[in-house]
Image: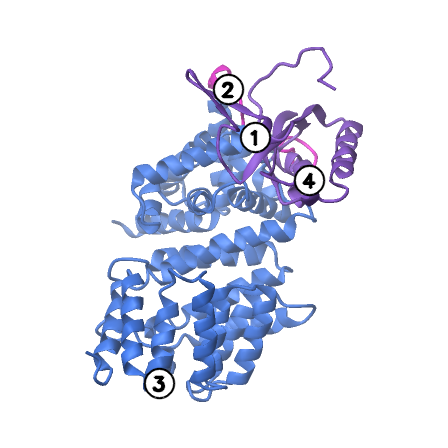
Chain colours: A blue, B purple
Amino acid sequence: MTHAEAAVEAAVADAHRRGWAQVLAATVRVTRDFDLAEECVQEAYAAALAGWGRDGIPDNPLAWLTTTAKRRALDAVRRTHTLRSKLPLLVEPLETGGAPADDEPDSLDPEHAVADERLRLVFLCCHPALAQEAQSALTLRLVCGLPTADIARALLVSEPTLAARITRAKRKIATARIPFRLPAAAELPDRLHAVLGVIHLLFTAGHTAPSGAPLTRPDLVAQAMRLARMLRELMPDEREVRGLLALLLVTDARRETRVDADGRLLLLEDQDRSLWDRAALAEGHDLIAGALRGGRPGRYLLQAAIASLYAEAPSYEQTDWPQIVALYDALLRAWPSPVVALNRAVADSMVSGPTQALQAVTELEQDGRLARYQYLPAVKADLLRRLGRSQEAAVAYRQALDLTGNDTERAFLEARLADLPQAR
Amino acid sequence: MAQYAILIYAKADVEEGEVVPGAREAHDRHFEDMVQSGALVAAFALHPADTATAVRGDTVTDGPFIDAKEVVAGVAVIEAPDLDAALAIAQANPAAQQGGGVEVRPVEGGYIADRPAAA
């Protein structure tokens, strides 16, 4: 490959990463049909690969791609006008007014109108009328522009299953008339929460692969991070958006140290803090510090604050445990979840001791909501181990092993079990 | 504009004494609101599920078709520009606040005879 060809390929790849969502959102305004719009956008990227080598990379690649995709869409719509679906996507006219968008050079689009288009797409994909599994699949397909095969692999379902899921979701969008527009102010908190939930889910799925050998799936983590950054750019004033981005940054900053050289899981207390990504931690810290000002913090911001506080301590022992417990108490008020209560118990074991923490964990166990959650018996086992109650700890480690699908985590639990004194 | 059916579900086996005070009045007010706004196309309230008779093939049995904790108590057909607008109307339905819930389904087609519903 020549130097010039490599440059074109890199420019197209960059435009795909940065611009797929905005090119697609502009094109779907013309087609009112996602399948056709996706086809036209794909063709535009293919045309860029061929044309930019010949004519040079345009000054504004995304405007070039948008114009090309929309022109193809117009041609296709004119050609197949009579054959088009009876139920097109419900597209509202752009609020910016003026001439119809397809007569206008896209480089003249006001910045905010383009931003709004991407947001519309995100909110459509994460509409609460769609199942969460459909929301994640649709977001990866339409907002990130990932091929179906990649999404299926990332979400651990077969390609036909995933393709059917996406088709069903698109059909529901058209049949039930889920609108392609920004939520009204009254709806925004709930709708934004659904969006943040999908991004967080993608990140978590990538960070701890539910089954199979490797602990992280970096591609999903990267997509989640990109979505969080995009949302932060589009909604700079939303504190929970900043909180989510900070949470992902701070969590991911420790990625390199979560397993040792042999791929074994390392607990926070055993991780080499000098290897953490200081730039990501600092960025997360700044986001949190800015967002904590003004009003009661939400769920993601508090989670980020907790993760950041853990990371700031020079060593595990020097963690500010009372402050961590206080943040967990605030988090429990914002998000009364048994998982939060379990994490609070872990932190509280460093303040009030393992006996009191074990009491809290036992109550959670009786509550039953975490019956399938592998970290509950794992936490219980660790507390029992610290109390010297090896027999009971062994029982709990085995319960945790029964619930854990990830090979790395299984190896960790097995090692802990084997290390117990007289655990036979 | 599109039409949506709002299927109103209530808890099955509600005893007379358990009825939320003011429940009927709340439904009447909601009905009036939908008429006033022009959203309402049709609405029907049904007698309790224990008055239902199920027919499947040649078999006739007592009770609703599906044995569930919630049963259909009524149905309304409304007109709305999109799903979000339909959901806003559905969310105002008192059934959603009275231990039941509503289901919103896009209408594919229908027919209403020009004749009043049973009194």
Does A306 sit above or below residue A53? Answer: below
Q: Are marks 2 and 3 in contact (CB under 8 Å)?
A: no
In three-dimensional space, the C-alpha distance between marks 1 and 3, rounded to whole angstroms, equals 55 Å
Q: Which mark is residue A411?
A: none
In three-dimensional space, the C-alpha distance between marks 2 and 4, rounded to whole angstroms, equals 62 Å
Chain containing the residue with disc 3: A
- Looking at the rendered structure, the secondary structure element under dot 3 is helix
Provide residue B54's location: percent of width, then percent of height.
50, 23
The residue carrying pointer 2 sits among few (fewer than 14), some (14 to 19) or many (20 or more) residues within 10 Å by Cα, namely few
- State the residue position of label 1: B105
Q: Which mark is residue A386?
A: 3
The amino acid type, in three-letter code, at marker 4 is: Glu
The amino acid type, in three-letter code, at marker 3 is: Arg
Q: Is residue A82 magenta?
A: yes
- The number of callouts visible is 4
At x 23%, y 72%, the residue is: A414
Asked whether residue A159 appears in the rendered view, the answer is yes
- Looking at the rendered structure, the secondary structure element under dot 1 is strand
If the image is split into quadrants, where does the C terminus of chain A sit?
A: bottom left
In three-dimensional space, the C-alpha distance between marks 3 and 4, rounded to whole angstroms, equals 56 Å
Provide residue B50's location: percent of width, then percent of height.
58, 30
Choose the circle earlier in sequence order: 2 or 3.
Answer: 2
Q: Which residues are magenta?
A: A78-100
Q: Are marks 2 and 4 in contact (CB under 8 Å)?
A: no
Q: Which mark is residue B16?
A: 4
> Quick one: A228 or A267, which is closer to the camera?
A267
In the image, taking residue A157 as reference, residue A76 lies left or right, namely: right
In three-dimensional space, the C-alpha distance between marks 2 and 1, rounded to whole angstroms, equals 32 Å
In three-dimensional space, the C-alpha distance between marks 2 and 3, rounded to whole angstroms, equals 72 Å
The amino acid type, in three-letter code, at marker 2 is: Arg
Choose the circle earlier in sequence order: 4 or 1.
Answer: 4
The amino acid type, in three-letter code, at marker 1 is: Arg
